[in-house]
Amino acid sequence: MKVVILAGGLGTRIAEYTDMIPKPMVPVGGRPIVWHIMNHYARYGFKDFCLALGFKAEAIKEYFLNYRVLGSNFTVDLASGSLSDIESPSVDWRVSLVDTGLATLTGGRVKRMARYLDRKPFMLTYGDGVADIDLRGLLDYHRAQQKMVTVTAVHPAARFGELSLTDGLVTEFREKPQVQGGWINGGFFVCEPEFLDLIEGDDTVLEREPLERLAAMGQLAAYRHEGFWQCMDTKRDRDVLDEMYMSGNAPWK
C-alpha cells in the first residue's frame, strides 16, 4: 500500500528553519522529520512512499537522490574517480518525489498524486508529525469499518502545566500533559481511491470541504489513538522532539 506524505507547505511558524529548508527537512536527532515519519511506516511494512512537494522541493529531492551516497562509508580513487562502497544503508524504500506546485493547498496536493496511486487504497499523512501509532491496527480498523476514509484521532499535548487543586492546595502537578477531554485530527489517514473524486482541485483544503463532506455522509471513521503524538509547529516543538530522540526516549522510534 502506498503512503502519501504532504511535504509542500511553507512552514511559516517555524521560520527559524524554513527560511533555508522546507519543514519536512527540519532535523530531529540529526535526521529530517520526514525520515522519522517514513521510518515508522517502514517498520510496519509500508515502504512505498509518494511525497507531495511544493516549497523548496529541490531540497527534498536532493536529500533522497543522494541518500545512498551520503549514508555510506566509501573509498574514492582520486586518480580514476572510481568509488568503492564499504558500507551502505540497508533501506529498501521506494520514494516518488512529485512537485505538486508552490501554491497548491492540501487537498489539491492529494488530488495531484492520483496518477501515482493506481485507483487503490492509500495511506496519507502530514510531513511534520510523529507518533507511536500502530499502523497495522489502523489499517485493520479501516477495513473493518468499511468507510471511505479513516482518520486517526489523538489527544493533543497541553501547552501549559496542569494543576489539580483541593482546598487551595496543589495536589498534583503535571507538566504539559496530554489533553484527555477532546480529540483532534492527528493525520495518519487511510483512504479509499473514491475519496479523490471529492477533491475539486488545487484550491481545495483537505481539512475543509472533502473531510467535512465525508463526515456529513457518514463516511469518515475515527481510529482513536491514546498513545504518543506530537506535531512540529514551532522551534520549541522541534527542540522537545530532538531532546526526546537524543536522550533515547523517543516513543516513535
Image (cartoon, rainbow, N blue to C red):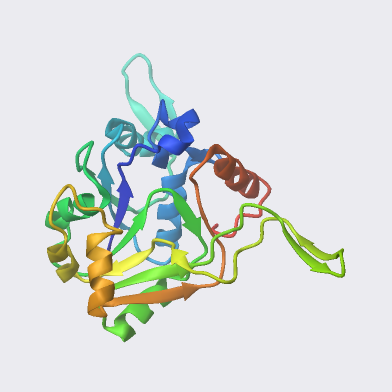
Tell me the residue at 47%/50% (across/down). 36
Tell whether 186 sits left or right of 106: right
Image quarter where the N terminus lies is bottom left
Relative image position of residue 8 (x, y in whole percent): 30, 42
Tell whether 247 sits left or right of 204: right
Q: Nearer the viewer, residue 84 or 61?
A: 61
Tell me the quarter of the picture where residue 86 sits.
top left
Tell me the residue at 16%/59% (across/down). 199
Q: Is residue 244 above or below residue 172?
A: above
| Residue 190 appears in the picture as rendered | yes
Q: Nearer the viewer, residue 119 or 94?
A: 119
- Residue furthest to the top in view is 79
Tell me the quarter of the picture where residue 45 sits.
bottom left
- Residue furthest to the front in view is 167
Q: Nearer the viewer, residue 14 or 50?
A: 14
Q: Is residue 37 above or below residue 211?
A: above
Image quarter where the C terminus lies is bottom right
